[in-house]
């Protein structure tokens, strides 16, 4: 991972339960501060990305590197998960066959994300995944068996 490219600013839809849950878990794991999160669904939000509207940002996840380069879609997740030490989870989406499948499936998921049942979102982001993220965040502040209070 090339830390010189960071921070990676992620523009996401906080009004979407699925998107918000995933970003909140990434926020907990973002102990190195490599990621910045911006709610693109906020009223009055104006996109800072040239030639990109708020509607564009809500139609597909976007992120911007410190040097201004913009990435979209599944690539955002690969880099975001890599930044928090979970790159192994998204690494298969870079393999040729799975990359093609992930890149084709993601737009469908985005179009239907508001229809994902609340119980499924809760199961994904409010149970064991959330506890693991909180535990990782606490552990990141521990050195030599001493933990700093937050």
Image: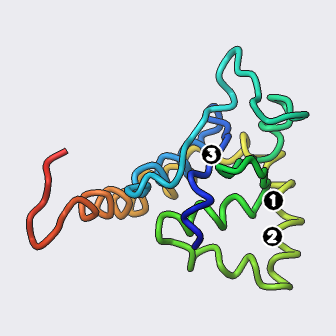
Mark 1 vs mark 3: in front: 3
Q: Which mark is residue 102?
A: 2
Left or right: where 124 falls relative to 63: left
- Secondary structure, mark 1, is helix
Q: In the orientation shown, which residue stands out farthest toward the left?
A: 146
Q: Which residue is mark 3?
A: 9
Q: Residue at x 84, y 31 (%)?
A: 55
Of 124 and 2, the residue lying toward us: 2
- Spatial distance from mark 1 to mark 2, Cα to Cα? 6 Å
Quarter of image, res 77: bottom right
Binning the other alpha carbons within 10 Å of mark 2 as few (below 14), some (14 to 19) or many (20 upward) gives some
Name the residue: 18% across, 64% down: 142
The x and y percentages for residue 18 are 61, 47
Circles 1, 2 touching at the beta carbon (< 8 Å): yes
Residue 100 location (% of width, % of height): 88, 75
Q: How many marks?
A: 3
Decide: is 21 above or below 136. Answer: above
Which disc is residue 106 wearing? 1
């Amino acid at each position: 991972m090339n830390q010189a490219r960071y921070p990676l600013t992620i523009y996401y839809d906080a009004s979407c339960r699925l998107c918000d849950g995933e970003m909140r878990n990434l926020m907990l794991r973002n102990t190195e501060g490599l990621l910045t999160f911006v709610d693109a669904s906020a009223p009055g939000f104006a996109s800072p990305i040239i030639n990109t509207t708020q509607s564009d940002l809500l139609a597909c996840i976007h992120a911007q590197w410190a040097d201004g380069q913009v990435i979209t879609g599944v690539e955002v997740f690969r880099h975001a998960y890599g930044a928090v030490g979970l790159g192994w989870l998204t690494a298969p989406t870079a393999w040729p066959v799975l990359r093609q499948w992930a890149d084709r499936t993601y737009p469908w998921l985005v179009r239907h994300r508001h229809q994902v049942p609340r119980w499924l979102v809760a199961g994904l982001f409010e149970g064991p995944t959330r506890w693991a993220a909180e535990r990782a965040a606490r552990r990141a502040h521990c050195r030599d068996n001493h933990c700093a209070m937050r």
